[in-house]
């Protein structure tokens, strides 16, 4: 596998071409941002930890019938993935209230929700990733009706699977964000699944084991990621 030119650099990852036009290398950086990059920093070894955690979660989801972009883990910070065209929507599921749901709707943090909330956001930093509904998605041509149905179905399945996956590690899945991509006509789960993109609370203590330690200056940031890594990989 030959690594070629840089294709794209985002806030937490870099994509590199390979000698195969159907695959790219996803490289995980230590950079961390929050609140649409108004807050910036680095978390030592975050890239290594998020790569490992993401690979394990994608493998688990694939074993349970979810189509994902993961081909294989290549190195500490690199994942080989199928090349996709990213659908410009961030799909969020909330099982308990936290973050922007509390800020925007005055809901008490930790409140149990009568049912999961599925949010669609426009993936566009210049506009602050605004919340949108199905009509926006279809009318603006971000996805077809069939693609949107598939994305929502897969997201709800991923929620049920990931809730069980983390609960077995004594971690409660509070909320998370997914991204999807198109590959040869198929919708695949893409991007990453890590403490950057999920809220993970330790069962019993309520300890935050995710990026909220960075967002909200809670301290021991690296240790949160390390704890998730340890539980997910058994190391
Ligand atoms: P929020 O409460 O800030 O809207 O975040 C909901 C979930 O989505 C949380 O698990 C963090 C994740 N998330 C991302 O992965 N990327 C983002 O840019 C944002 C805003 C949230
Ligand atoms: N990654 C996002 C950003 O910088 C936000 C977040 O995860 O809170 O802006």
Image (cartoon, rainbow, N blue to C red):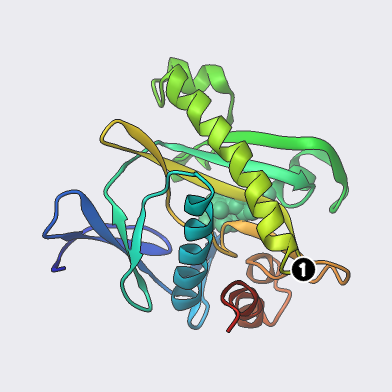
Left or right for 82, reference 175: left
Can I make out residue 45 in this image? Answer: yes
Quarter of the rendering containing residue 120: top right
Q: Could you tell me residue 221's position as x and y percent?
A: 64, 78
Q: Residue at x 63, y 35 (%)?
A: 119
In this view, the residue in front, 163 or 63, is 63
Left or right for 191, reference 116: left
Residue 29 lies, with reference to residue 137, above or below; the image says: below
Q: Quadrant of the C terminus?
A: bottom right
Q: Quadrant of ligand 2?
A: bottom right
For label 1, the residue is 170
Q: Quadrant of the N terminus?
A: bottom left
Looking at the rendered structure, the secondary structure element under dot 1 is loop
Quarter of the rendering containing residue 154: top right
Q: Could you tell me residue 150's position as x and y percent?
A: 49, 29
Q: Residue at x 41, y 36 (%)?
A: 88
In this view, the residue in front, 60 or 166, is 60
Residue 37 lies, with reference to residue 136, above or below; the image says: below
Q: Residue at x 80, y 71 (%)?
A: 207
Left or right for 106, reference 163: right
Q: Residue at x 69, y 62 (%)?
A: 166
Can I make out residue 36 in this image? Answer: no
Q: Could you tell me residue 6's position as x and y percent?
A: 20, 62
Residue 220 lies, with reference to residue 27, above or below; the image says: below
């Amino acid at each position: 596998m030959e690594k070629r030119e840089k294709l794209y650099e985002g806030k937490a990852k870099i994509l590199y071409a390979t000698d195969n036009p159907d695959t790219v290398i996803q490289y995980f950086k230590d950079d961390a941002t929050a609140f649409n990059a108004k807050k910036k920093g680095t978390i030592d070894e975050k890239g290594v930890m998020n790569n490992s955690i993401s690979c394990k979660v994608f493998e688990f989801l694939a074993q349970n019938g979810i189509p994902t972009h993961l081909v294989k883990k290549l190195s500490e910070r690199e994942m080989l993935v199928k090349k996709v065209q990213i659908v410009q929507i961030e799909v969020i599921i909330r099982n308990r209230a936290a973050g922007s749901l509390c800020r925007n709707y005055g809901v008490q943090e930790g409140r149990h929700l009568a049912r999961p909330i599925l949010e669609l956001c426009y993936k566009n930093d210049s506009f602050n990733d605004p919340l949108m509904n199905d009509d926006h998605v279809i009318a603006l041509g971000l996805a077809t009706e069939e693609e949107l149905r598939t994305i929502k179905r897969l997201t709800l399945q991923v929620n049920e699977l990931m809730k069980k996956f983390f609960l077995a590690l004594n971690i409660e899945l509070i909320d998370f964000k997914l991204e999807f991509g198109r590959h040869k006509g198929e919708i695949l789960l893409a991007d990453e699944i890590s403490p950057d993109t999920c809220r993970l609370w330790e069962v019993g203590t309520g300890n935050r084991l995710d990026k909220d330690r960075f967002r909200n200056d809670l301290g021991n940031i690296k240790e949160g990621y390390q704890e998730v890594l340890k539980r997910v990989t058994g190391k």
